[in-house]
Image (tube, rainbow, N blue to C red):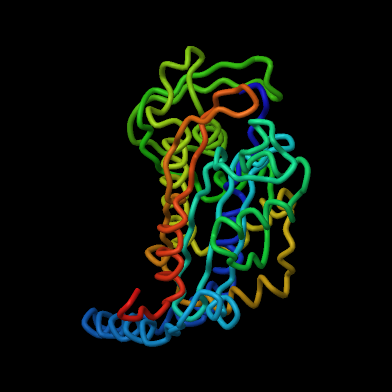
């Protein structure tokens, strides 16, 4: 772990805060109207949930959905030097206020013509030769040609600032995470005890950077997939807290660490569309597939082989594709 992992979380933080920015003013202006009875609140919630379902548009194919849907798709990239150490596909549906977040393992196998070395057939190597646009095309290819409207990249410093600004994030540390690397820049010393605890910015960064112990005997049993699960646990806990805080000013702390093609006008527009979004409207999952060993260029490496059939099923459900009797 000599190369410093520039964590992806601030990008997701930026996205969540940006789209909740507009809802803060709305909720603040309507605070005094919240003294209705509990029964009335339940009725209103059921009505709004039913209303959201009715707003879902139905399409007959993915190509039609891609062309006509209002969905906003974003790739979120956490960088490790010239490699994308973390890739997330996030899809926001303005009508239903739902966000689908799918983590793409960095070892995902992808064929590139003219790039035959073993390490070049992993998705995390694409950025080095083709930049953001190359990663955008690769993710779109994996997700059945889905349009990628925006990208977000970030570095690690904003993680500490934003996590500290909301008073820390609660997670369950699955085992004693201990790792030391004095040669890292900056030096890395991780020592997190097993159990439930609230992590400040510094400790959150350690939790997210952890991959394995010095002897490689104390890492995640299922490798990078285990780390993805830990990241998603953190994201869920963080999102719950941010949406309950409703503190849009925290965006100021992380903004300077984010690189994105989302303009301020876009962000404000998305925030208006996200009015009423709740933490349960955000779902987390991992790209369908399995880890396999393959030999290329004389090297035996572990690749994550994605499942195209299952990805198509997920997209058809996400985009509300109407099934025919023969499907």
x%, y% of residue 155?
69, 42
Q: Is residue 296 visible?
A: yes
x%, y% of residue 200?
51, 38
Q: Residue furthest top?
A: 215
x%, y% of residue 170?
40, 43
Q: Residue furthest left?
A: 39
- Nearest the camera: 309 or 124? 309
- The number of callouts visible is 0
Residue 283, by quadrant, is bottom left
- In which quadrant of the rendered image does the C terminus lie? bottom left
Q: Is residue 160 visible?
A: no
- Nearest the camera: 227 or 190? 227
- Nearest the camera: 285 or 111? 111
- In which quadrant of the rendered image does the N terminus lie? top right
Q: Is residue 217 above or below residue 303?
A: above
Q: Is residue 128 above or below residue 137?
A: above
Residue 2, by quadrant, is top right
Residue at horizontal 40 percent and vertical 64 percent from the top: 313
Q: Is residue 272 above or below residue 281?
A: below
Residue at horizontal 74 percent and vertical 68 percent from the top: 263
x%, y% of residue 117?
69, 31
Residue at horizontal 73 percent and vertical 34 percent from the top: 81
Residue at horizontal 47 percent and vertical 17 percent from the top: 216
């Amino acid at each position: 772990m000599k190369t410093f992992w520039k964590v992806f979380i601030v990008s997701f933080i930026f996205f969540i805060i940006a789209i909740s920015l507009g809802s803060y003013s709305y909720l603040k202006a309507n605070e005094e109207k919240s003294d209705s009875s509990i029964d009335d609140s339940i009725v209103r919630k059921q009505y709004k949930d039913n209303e959201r379902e009715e707003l879902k548009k139905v399409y007959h194919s993915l190509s039609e959905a891609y062309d006509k849907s209002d969905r906003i798709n974003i790739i979120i990239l956490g960088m490790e030097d010239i490699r994308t150490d973390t890739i997330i596909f996030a899809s926001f549906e303005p009508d239903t206020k739902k966000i689908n977040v799918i983590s793409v393992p960095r070892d995902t196998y992808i064929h590139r013509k003219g790039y035959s070395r073993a390490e070049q057939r992993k998705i995390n190597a694409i950025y080095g030769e083709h930049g953001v646009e190359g990663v955008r095309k690769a993710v779109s290819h994996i997700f059945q040609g889905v349009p990628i409207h925006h990208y977000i990249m970030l570095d690690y410093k904003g993680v500490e600032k934003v996590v500290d600004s909301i008073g820390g994030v609660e997670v369950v540390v699955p085992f004693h995470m201990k790792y030391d690397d004095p040669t890292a820049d900056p030096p890395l010393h991780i020592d997190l005890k097993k159990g439930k605890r609230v992590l400040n910015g510094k400790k959150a960064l350690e939790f997210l950077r952890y991959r394995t112990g010095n002897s490689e005997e104390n890492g995640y049993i299922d490798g990078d997939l285990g780390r993805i699960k830990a990241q998603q646990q953190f994201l869920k806990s963080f999102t719950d807290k941010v949406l309950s805080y409703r503190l849009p000013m925290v965006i100021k702390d992380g903004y300077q660490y984010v690189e994105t093609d989302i303009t301020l006008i876009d962000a404000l527009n998305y925030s208006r569309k996200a009015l009423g979004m709740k933490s349960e409207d955000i779902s987390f999952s991992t790209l369908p597939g399995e880890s396999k060993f393959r030999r290329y260029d004389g090297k035996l490496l572990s690749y994550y082989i994605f499942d195209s059939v299952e990805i198509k099923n997920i997209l058809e459900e996400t985009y509300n594709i109407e099934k025919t009797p023969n499907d």
